[in-house]
Image (cartoon, grey):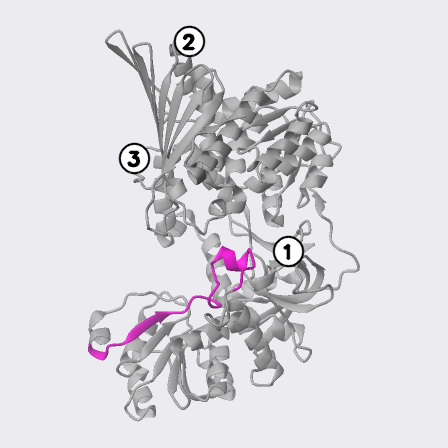
Amino acid sequence: MLQVLQYQKNGEMLVAELPQPQCRAGGILVRTVASLISAGTERSSVAGAQSSMLERARSQPEAVKQIIENIKKEGLIATYERVKSKLESYKMLGYSASGIVVESRCPEFATGDRVACAGAQFAHHAEYISVPKNLAVRIPDKVSFEDACYTTLGAIAMQGVRQADVRLGETVAVIGLGLLGQITVQLLKASGCRTVGLDINEALFPMASEFGCEATFVSKLESASAIKSFTRGLGTDAVIITASTDSDEPMLLALDIARKKSPVVVVGAVPMNVPRSPFYEKELELRISCSYGPGRYDPIYEENGIDYPSGYVRWTENRNMGAFLDLIAAGSLRVESMTTHRIAINDAVMGYDLITGKIREPYLGIVLNYPESAAPSKKCIKNKEFDKQSSVGLGLVGAGSFAQAMLLPPLKAAGVDFAAVSTSTPANAKSAAHKFGFAQFSTDSSEVIADKNVSFVVIASRHDSHARYVEQALIAGKPAFVEKPLAINREQLDAIDEFAANGRIMVGFNRRFSAPFKAIKEFFGKRSDPMTMVYRVNAGSIPKANWIQDTAQGGRIIGEGCHFFDCMTYLCGALPIAVYAESISGANREIANHDIVSITVKFTDGSVGTLHYFANGDASLGKEYCEVFCENSVAIMDNFTKVSLHRGKKQKILTFDGSKGHREEIEATVKAVKSGTPMPIGYAEIRAVTLATFAAEESLATGNKIPIM
């Protein structure tokens, strides 16, 4: 299929052939008929990527701050690889489209339904899009696909009007008469309001007047007196700012023209440098309109399809989308006349040349049109000829930032042939193929695992899918390396057990391969007594909306705690046999109590390990710290940069570069795959560590000490 992309390193725009996305669970697969380029939002995004690195840094101080924090947390090399991976990727554009359902995995829609779709993560400028059900609505029979592709912007405008809470006969100023502003004017007209339109571009005034503006003015402070005269000296009953600008002038103008105790609603992208005096003297109310409406940015609503009850949340983003289409069908809104350009998807770059000013031509609504496809697009795209250089053909399932930064560079260095890569997002698959030279890229992981050129499968997808892909690889007779965790429940682990004898499995427990822990292992190499180990992890808080916090992904103890159980298993050389865990019992709903735990593990040799996994610390403290006591000796690992060894009243300090063993882990795994020798970690250890994480969760739930069987 064809899709509009932007290469992040140099800002180049292109229309690329990509694999068709899979229809998501609880969603629909849509063949796109029309999509709308949002001039304001997309112009900022495109122009930002086309600017220099210095200009990007100046315009994105929060991103620079995040990079600095990542350097402190993960080290310079790991952070560099992540930033490099981000720059060498393709960005998807678009968030408002319409088309026909070609596959449905939810009861709300059927094949053949005409739908309008929303979401920057989903409704891209692409021939096929996979959309969750709450971000799609049926198109009424009287509404065309071209009109329906305005639905997302319509929902944004509608939410802004709802935030203004206007009444019949009130006077409302709309600052910014682009697409959002023109739709807002029509919505206000339909609501029985008198509307004043303002923009720096007077060429937009005739359309605004046609849509219902009773007066139009140039958007500048000098227009305030004329607007006050229009309102008979009262001032506006509300101001809705739909402009997109770096200037403070729209906000200052809004404060000047608004009457006492009225709302100022920000819909567009404008600075929020608000002077105190006008707000204080007029007791104005500043309101921020959140995109399409309630549900936006809530993964439970958008991705999981859990609706808000209409009795409590009357207007969700989905219901706003539906209401907008109803108004078009009733003739209360006209969007067709806003379309100034219709461009075929093959020529989509022209649309971006318009909004960035490379083509100097007036524009407003730019609609991309898509050809009818006789058959679904491919799910696998050839990037280049497969060049077999070694005995190992790599098939990668999942190519997120971690895989690209931490797994693929050492895999490349280990000399494997990059045969195929799959991700759920077509653009990410292309990014990985482009950067690392995979012969083909796909959105179908099963195809990659089954590919004839793939002899070794690396799995770095979301946690709930790990066990399924491991099982597929083993059935196909191919060794598998899977990022932790191996499985998220006992049922998944049992299924893997059935095939473990027929294939070889390696899990990404990298810390045991790091130089600091190898040094500690050697330090205690001749011990006879059991060990006591204390591993403190300053894990950091992860918002509950993050996918990692989804219960379907197993949680953080199963997802990351397994690292530390494995490290203790490695140090003592024995398997875990029992687990007891306690978490805090706080009332703060923003914090997951199970992210702040102390877990004690007993091992078969009598050793005891305690994991303190804390998500309530401060980022200035290093993430990981481990103390090992045994036979009047102590070893202390401090965040992979230092190990202090204490014995005979003497201390020895070893220093390291902060790396956590990813390179050594991959080297050892590839060596085993090439030679046919056992994997670096035996399956019995991997299985016991995985069971220990399940036992920790069970102990947290029951308050009991849980034996591992």
Instruction: Give the image location of residue 440, x and y in percent.
Output: 69, 40
Report the amino acid beneath label 1. Gln
In depth, the one of 238 and 337 nearer the eye is 238
Helix, strand or loop for the magenta stretch, by majority: loop
* In the rendered image, the vertical position of residue 476 relative to residue 167, given as above or below: above
Q: Point out which mark residue 3 bears.
A: 1
Question: Which of the two labelled residues, at mark 3 and mark 2, occupies the earlier sequence position?
Answer: 2
Report the amino acid beneath label 2. Gly
Instruction: Give the image location of residue 30, x and y in percent.
Output: 67, 61
In whole angstroms, how far apart are the C-alphas of marks 3 and 1? 43 Å
In whole angstroms, how far apart are the C-alphas of marks 1 and 2? 57 Å
- Can you tell which of label 3 and label 1 is closer to the viewer? 3
Q: Is residue 12 left or right of residue 592?
A: right
User: Which residue position holds label 2?
Assistant: 525
Query: For the view shown, which residue lies furthest in the right direction?
Result: 374
The quadrant the N terminus occupies is bottom right
10 Å crowding of disc 1: few (<14), some (14-19), many (20+): many
Report the amino acid beneath label 3. Leu
- Residue stretch in magenta: 281-307
